[in-house]
Image: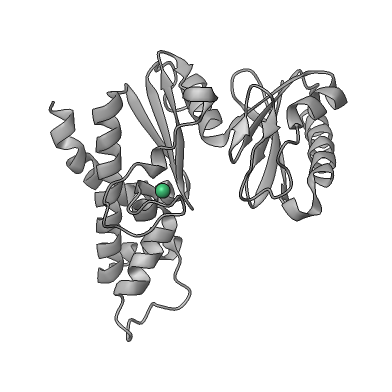
Amino acid sequence: MIGSVDIGGTKIAVGMVDDTGRLLSKMESSTDADRGYPDALNRIASMLRESAQNAGAEISGIGIGSTGPVYPFSGEFGDVDFLRGWEGKNLVQDLERIFYVQAAIENDGDAAALAEAAWGAGKGKSRLIYVTIGTGIGGGIILDGRLYRGVDQAHPEVGHHIVDPSGPPCSCGFRGCWESLAAGPAVLAWMESTAPPNYPNRKGLTAKRIFELAREGDELALAAVKRETYYLGLGIANLINLFTPDMIVLGGSIMKSSDLLLDGVREIMLPVCAI
Ligand SMILES: [Zn+2]
């Protein structure tokens, strides 16, 4: 039984997962990083205990996926944007000390790639790229059945390959990164800057709402979806050209509308798939 911990900027989720990948119980708490690392450690430990109790299970190991940068080989947090003051703290050692089991930490994109390859949509694929499209674009790369790590074990940032150098500025300092063009905020930003002043659906717009409007036949929302499809497809085509993987697994909140996107994305991918 694996105690699983997912640390994001907004919430921390904890669950019990058996060795077939089945989720048996789940709890969550808001991250509240400002309350400090010791407070978060206590909450994580008590959620793990309660979640194990709910599943009627004894924890035999702990796996942590966290928004990065994190250092899997030492177990420490790096300088994470959403976790101010947590740098250098070692959740792996702390949870091992509390629960007397082995623990491991990975960047959440890498953890998700490993999970998809072991138990998910890419089960058994030895060359797999996982991409999550939500507030940002992240992911992980598995080559020859192993997680790909770069120099100094660095995590590759698929969301920051440049798709259009004349595109919008990105948080990383470049312009036109895949993330700046195709993540949720980019869908919203395009819509807000393109909608005429008298556009009736301007109020309360979110990426999610834009997909709903597209379903209702709103022309501007359909154009936003078309643009999203285009940039999503370009990024995926680049990944195929660079890595020729067995499979690319897509996740994240934007993919809840995959029915509106995937046909178009496949069309854009055609030239690379013909190579
Ligand atoms: Zn970037």
Return the x and y of residue 120 as percentages of the image width and height.
48, 26
Seen from the viewer's position, the closer of residues 184 and 258 is 184
Number of labels in the image equals 0
Residue at 53% over, 24% down: 153
Residue at 13% over, 35% down: 271
Task: Find residue 269 and report its image quarter.
Answer: top left
Q: Quadrant of the C terminus?
A: top left
Residue 162 vs residue 117: left or right? left
Return the x and y of residue 115 as percentages of the image width and height.
53, 26
Return the x and y of residue 133 as percentages of the image width and height.
43, 46
- Which colour style is shown? one colour
Residue 260 vs residue 97: left or right? left
- Compared with 35, 3 (above or below) is above
Residue 262 visible, this angle:
no
Seen from the viewer's position, the closer of residues 45 and 243 is 243
Residue at 16% over, 36% down: 270
